[in-house]
Image (tube, rainbow, N blue to C red):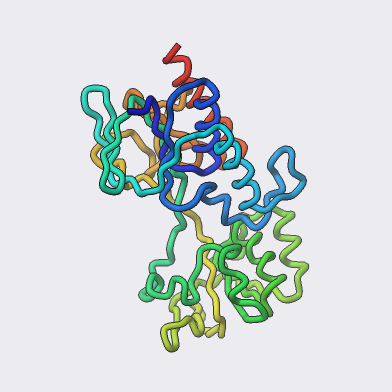
Amino acid sequence: MYNTIIIGSGIAGMTAAIYLKRANISCLVIEKSSPGGQINKASNVENYPGFKSIDGPSLALNIYEQLTKLEVDMKFGEVSKIENKLGKKLIYVNDEILECQNIIVATGRKPRELNLENEKGLIGHGVSYCALCDGIFYKNKDVAVVGGGNSAFEEAYYLSNICNRVFLVHRSSNFRASALNQKKVKAKENIIIKENEQVKKINEKDTYLNSITLSSGEELKVNGLFIYIGSDPDTSFLEGLNIESENGYLIVNENMETNIEGVYACGDVIFKKVYQLTTAVGEATVAASSIIKNND
């Protein structure tokens, strides 16, 4: 039995583990994919203190090495559900039931899909949600990026240095990306911006993406489609706990505790105004500190 189980090993989950372990609080981190979470999908991070520029996987590895040095316990698996019984928390992961006193939910967000007919079937066959992961497979080929925020612009810029041409498709002429990201993208000759357009159809040939059809009827011959249209909180495993939420995002108090005693949350999974690596680190620190104080 652990004092605290942390679900998710993004920057928030790993930060919480560092603080708990250093305070001699027994803790376990559960991760369903790889340490770092969404950071691993960032081709470049330039707004994290201490680094002028660093790629996401390297930043994630640096933090993970801190956990390794502290000998933080980690388990790889996917949590299916949580039960709260008489103050004890039961976590169902793989074929096991783990018990703890406190839980920190740090599962972050998962990419939003276009919900097109053959989108899921073409994942890994032309459809991707991570340019850093899959961009190299489209070297010197034409690709498309969907979205108008910072992620879409940053990854379009990254792909432009690998691919022949990058079509940036957005449903309006107003972009949410920062002025700096817009300036960088618009300065690249091989990035073609398609404003007021939506992807209406994904066309395949021999089980691979062959082209996309836009709302105007124009067909773009591309080999890769990278989707960056936002994300949703990863909280499906919390169904049945009656945790207060707003549009799926968990509501927490100033101590990062939900309406259920002993269940905390931090990072991109909570309802807040700013979603940044730095805010996730701060929230994780508060969550861990709250647990530490309650154990004094």
**Residue 283 shows up from this direction:** no
Q: Quadrant of residue 123?
A: bottom left
Residue furthest to the top in view is: 296
Q: Position of residue 184 (x, y in %)?
A: 75, 62
| 117 up-or-down from 130: above or below | below
Q: Residue at x 31, y 34 (%)?
A: 243
Q: Position of residue 70 (x, y in %)?
A: 56, 32
Q: Quadrant of residue 132?
A: bottom right
**Residue placed most toward the observer, 180 or 14:** 14
Q: Position of residue 182 (x, y in %)?
A: 71, 60
Q: Residue at x 49, y 51 (%)?
A: 34
Q: Quadrant of residue 172?
A: bottom right
Left or right placement of residue 265 versus residue 196 in this view: left
**Residue 131 shows up from this direction:** yes
Left or right placement of residue 160 versus residue 195 in this view: right
Count numbered badges in the picture: 0
Q: Residue at x 51, y 47 (%)?
A: 35
